[in-house]
C-alpha cells in the first residue's frame, strides 16, 4: 500500500477512496474494499454495484477456499488479499473486534 487513500465515511461504496497500491511491478490508483469474509463481496452485492467498479484491491480476513480474485460489475478481475495469511490469530481477532463488532 503506497497510500491508503481517504476513509469513506458514507455508508455506501468502497471503504477507502483514491488509494495507491503497488501489485508486483504495477502501481494502481483507485478504491479499496475491506470485508470480513471473502464471500461478503458477493453477499453484499459489490459484484453488481457500479460504485465498486473503481476498486483496485479487495481485503478480507477469512478466505476459506483461498480465492485470489473478485470481479466487479464490468467483469474486471480485482486482486483479493486475505490478511489471515499474514497476521496471527490474536491480531486478526483484535482487528475483527474493532472493525466488525457485530460478529
Image (spheres, rainbow, N blue to C red):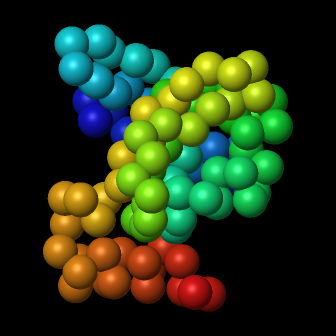
78 horizontally vs 52: left or right: left
- From what the image shows, is residue 50 above or below residue 40? above
Q: Residue at x 52, y 67 (%)?
A: 36
Q: For residue 6, say whether it is visible.
A: no
* Residue 44 quadrant: bottom right
Q: Residue at x 21, y 13 (%)?
A: 25
- From what the image shows, is residue 70 above or below residue 62? above
9 horizontally vs 17: left or right: right
Residue 71: x and y in percent read 63, 32
Of residue 77 and residue 94, the one placed in the foreground of this image is 77
Q: Residue at x 71, y 51 (%)?
A: 42
Residue 86: x and y in percent read 19, 59
Of residue 94 and residue 37, the one placed in the foreground of this image is 37
Quarter of the image containing the C terminus? bottom right
* Residue 97 quadrant: bottom left
- From what the image shows, is residue 35 above or below residue 67? below
Q: Residue at x 28, y 23 (%)?
A: 22
Residue 4: x and y in percent read 38, 39
76 horizontally vs 83: left or right: right
Quarter of the image containing the N terminus? top left
Q: For residue 67, say whether it is visible.
A: yes
Residue 75: x and y in percent read 69, 22
Amino acid at each position: 500500500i503506497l497510500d491508503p487513500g481517504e476513509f469513506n465515511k458514507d455508508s455506501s461504496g468502497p471503504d477507502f477512496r483514491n488509494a495507491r497500491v503497488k501489485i508486483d511491478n504495477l502501481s494502481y490508483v483507485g478504491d479499496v474494499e475491506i470485508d470480513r469474509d471473502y464471500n461478503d463481496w458477493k453477499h453484499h452485492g459489490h459484484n453488481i454495484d457500479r460504485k465498486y467498479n473503481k476498486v483496485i484491491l479487495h481485503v478480507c480476513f477469512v478466505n476459506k477456499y483461498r480465492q485470489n480474485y473478485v470481479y466487479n460489475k464490468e467483469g474486471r478481475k480485482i486482486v483479493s488479499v486475505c490478511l489471515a495469511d499474514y497476521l496471527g490469530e490474536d491480531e486478526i481477532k483484535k482487528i475483527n473486534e474493532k472493525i466488525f463488532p457485530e460478529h
